Amino acid sequence: MINTHDILETINMIQEENLDIRTITMGISLLDCIDSDIEKACSKVYDKICHKAQNLVKTGEEIEKEYGIPIINKRISVTPISMISAASKGDPIKFAKILDKAAKEVGVNFLGGYSALVQKGFAAGDIELIKSIPQALAETERICSSVNIGSTKTGINMDAVKLMGEIVRESAILTKDNGLVGPSKLVIFCNAVEDNPFMAGAFHGAGEPDCVINVGVSGPGVVRAALSKIPDADITEIADTVKRTAFKITRVGQLVATEASRRLGVPFGIVDLSLAPTPAIGDSVAHILEEMGLEQCGACGTTACLALLNDAVKKGGVMASSHVGGLSGAFIPVSEDAGMIDAARNNTLCIEKLEAMTAVCSVGLDMIAIPGDTPAEVISAIIADEAAIGMVNSKTTAVRVIPAIGKKDGEEIEFGGLFGVSPIMKVNTASPAKFINRGGRIPAPLQSLKN
C-alpha cells in the first residue's frame, strides 16, 4: 500500500536535502572485440558501445522526468583496455580516442576502463597501456583511467607502484594548463571491484555479464538532515537513524536501477549505496560527521564517527536492494566535499588524518591536491601506504592525488564543476626513494590464505 508520508518524505529529500541518483552506469564487455588488427579492434569497440548504449542517456532522462528523481550522470564502463589491446599491435592511444568518440556519440559524460590490472605482475600490453595514460587523458575529454596495483590475495606490485607515481606526475604536467584533468581522472587501486559505477575508477570486470546496468545513489544531505532532528541522541540512536535513512535512499536507487534495466533490456547489476558528496552546500559527508558532534571534520574522533557512518550505511542499504555492490559506504574526496574543503583550509584536516580515515571508509585518498614539486617517489609511497591499508584490511582503497604544478601547500586550485576546489595539502617529503626503487612485490598477508 502506498504511504503518503513516505511519498512526501522522498519529495522533501529530493527538493531540500540533495538526494539524487549520482549515476546510471552501463557496463559493456569488449572481450568479443579483440582483434590482432588494431584498426579492426577499434572499429568493433566503437560499434558495440554505440549499439549497446544508444538509448542510455535518453532512458535516464525519461526516468528522471517521470519519477522526479534527479539522475546526475549517465556513464559507461568497459573491459580493462589492456586486455583488449594486448592482442593488437599498435599504439593503445588509438583505443582511448575511439572510446572518447563513442562516449561523445552516445552522450555520456564519462567512460571508464582505460585500465590495467597488474596486482601480481605485468601481462602483455599492460606496461604499454600504463605508459600511455598521461597522453590518453590529455588528448581525450571523457575517458577515465585506473590501475589496480595490489590485492589481499596477491600482495602489492611495487614495480607498478613506482611506475604509477611517475605516471601521476607526468599526467599532471601534461594537463597543467587544462585544469589538471589528467590526474583528476586517474585512480590507483588496491582490491579494485568489478562492478563499481563511480568514476574515475569504474571498469567492467571480466566476470561481469556482456552488458549490465549499475546504479550509484547519493544522499549525504539526507543523512545530515535526519541527524539534525535528534541533537541529543546517543550513539546507538544515531546509528539506527543512519541505517533507516540509508534504507530509504537505497530504495530509490533500486527503483531507478530496476526501471532502467527493464527499459533498456539489459540485466540489473548492483546498486552502489555510497554517500558521494559534491561541493554543493548541504551535500557533504564531513558535515554528517560534524552533526554527530565534532567541531570540525579532522578533529580527534573523526575516524570513529566515519566508521560508525560507513557501517550503518551498509547495514541499512543492504536490506533495501536485491543486489548491493560496487564500493558502498562513504566517500571522502577533499575537493568534492564542502565540509572537507573548509576543514583543509583551517588545517584541521591533514593528509595523515585522511589516511587514517581511509582505514574505515569506502575508497581512500581521493581528489587531494598536493604541491606541484612533490617527487614521483613520494607519490609512489603515498600509493604504497594506501594500498597496504587495503591489502591488510581486505577492503578497497585507492589514491587519486593531483600534483598542482607551479603551486605550493597553502594555496588553492579550482577544478570547477563536480571536482570543486581544493586547498593544496602539505606532504611529508622525507625521501622514500630507496624503498620505492627496490621493486619486487610486498607478499600477501596471512589473511589471504582462506582457501
Image (spheres, rainbow, N blue to C red):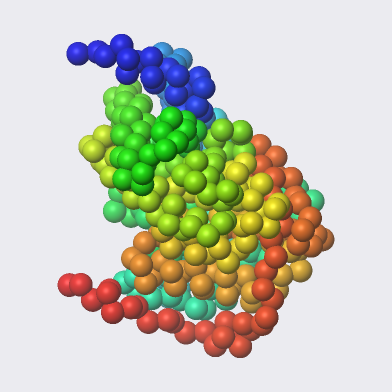
Numbered marks: total: 0
Query: Residue 221 at x, y = what percent?
Result: 49, 33
Residue at horizontal 63 percent and vertical 84 percent from the top: 433
Query: Residue 376 at x, y = what percent?
Result: 66, 73
Toward the viewer: 82 or 9?
9
Toward the viewer: 383 or 283?
283
- Left/right of residue 160 with respect to residue 265 in the rendered view: right
Residue at horizontal 42 percent and vertical 38 percent from the top: 232
Query: Residue 247 at x, y = what percent?
Result: 31, 34
From what the image shows, is residue 337 above or below residue 441? above
Q: Which residue lies furthest to the front in this view?
A: 232
- Left/right of residue 102 with respect to residue 249 in the rendered view: right
Residue 26 shows in this picture: no
Residue at horizontal 52 percent and vertical 78 percent from the top: 159
Q: Residue furthest right?
A: 406
Residue at horizontal 76 percent and vertical 62 percent from the top: 409
Residue 445 shows in this picture: yes
Q: Quadrant of residue 339?
A: top right
- Left/right of residue 410 with respect to residue 436 in the rendered view: right
From what the image shows, is residue 307 above or below residue 45? below
Toward the viewer: 229 or 66?
229
Toward the viewer: 264 or 434?
434
> Which quarter shows the C terminus?
bottom left
> Which quarter shows the N terminus?
top left
From what the image shows, is residue 144 above or below residue 410? above
Query: Residue 281 at x, y = what percent?
Result: 61, 33
- Left/right of residue 412 with respect to residue 328 in the rendered view: right
